[in-house]
Image (cartoon, rainbow, N blue to C red):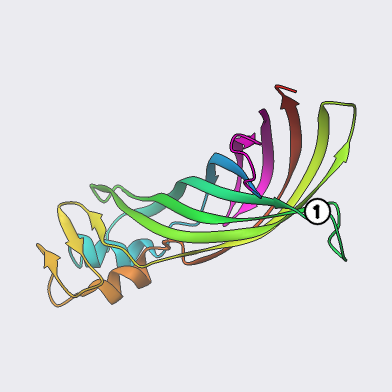
């Protein structure tokens, strides 16, 4: 059995990076490797004023500052293409879990709150590696992930896609919360990095 360790940096809905470990030939006859990865990236958080209305109140005092951050956990089946146009490239696909947090801070407005969501998704893509030496490779990767709608929670209030809510403000709904907070939906991904093969 061999395994790869890799690190990449690039764009995943925002600037960031990821690390992964891949296992090869751990089961006889299995036509793919398994890769477990974790990534972190920044992401535009959304509309600060609308988020304040949806999750707190209709006040508008203070100067808004905001930021978004995201962790992604991925499990991929990895297939090496040995024939055809994509020979030498690697195709991958699998489930994703995204944990996104958008922070909104209204300076001099006495409001500082974070809206969070955890989403399941599916992703895939293509990558190609170029040998540096017998164990190390330079890798580029291009792909995309799609995430399902999920509850948005902040400041004690939760809006769910099924229409249910906990402590909603005024007549706001999940659609309003979704408009205010920039949770991932369809996310393109481009990155470059290094890979080292061990165990062989």
- Give residue 147's quadrant in the image: bottom left
Q: Is residue 199 left or right of residue 139?
A: left
State the residue at coordinates (24%, 49%).
111
* Quadrant of image for the N terminus: top right
* Disc 1 target residue: 89
User: Mark 1: which secondary structure?
Assistant: strand
Q: Say if the magenta span includes residue 161.
A: no
In depth, the one of 152 and 194 nearer the eye is: 194
Residue with the most extreme top position = 199
Disc count in the image? 1
**157 relative to 33, above or below:** below
How far across and how far down the image is residue 13, in percent? 57, 57
In depth, the one of 9 and 93 nearer the eye is: 93
Q: Is residue 66 visible?
A: no
Q: Is residue 170 visible?
A: yes
Q: Is residue 66 left or right of residue 135?
A: left
State the residue at coordinates (62%, 39%).
28
- Give residue 29's quadrant in the image: top right
In depth, the one of 150 and 106 nearer the eye is: 150
How far across and how far down the image is residue 88, in percent? 85, 51
Q: Which residues are magenta?
A: 1-30
State the residue at coordinates (68%, 41%).
9
Magenta stretch secondary structure, dominant:
strand
Q: Residues within 10 Å of mark 1 (few under 14, many from 20)?
A: some
């Amino acid at each position: 059995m061999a395994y790869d360790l890799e690190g990449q940096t690039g764009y995943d809905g925002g600037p960031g990076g990821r690390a992964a470990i891949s296992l090869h030939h751990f089961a006889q006859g299995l036509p793919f490797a398994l890769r477990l990865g974790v990534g972190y990236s920044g992401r535009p958080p959304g509309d600060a004023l609308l988020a304040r209305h949806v999750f707190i109140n209709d006040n508008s005092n203070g100067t808004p500052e905001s930021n978004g951050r995201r962790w992604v956990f991925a499990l991929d089946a990895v297939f090496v293409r040995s024939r055809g146009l994509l020979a030498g490239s690697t195709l991958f696909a699998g489930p994703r879990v995204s944990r996104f947090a958008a922070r909104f801070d209204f300076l001099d407005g006495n409001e500082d709150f974070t809206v969070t969501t955890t989403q399941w998704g599916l992703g895939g893509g293509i990558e190609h590696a170029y040998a540096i030496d017998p164990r190390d490779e330079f890798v580029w990767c291009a792909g995309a992930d799609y995430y399902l709608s999920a509850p948005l929670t902040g400041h004690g209030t939760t809006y769910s896609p099924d229409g249910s809510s906990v402590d909603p403000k005024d007549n706001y709904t999940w659609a309003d919360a979704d408009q205010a907070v920039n949770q991932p939906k369809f996310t393109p991904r481009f990155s470059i990095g290094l890979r080292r093969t061990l165990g062989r």
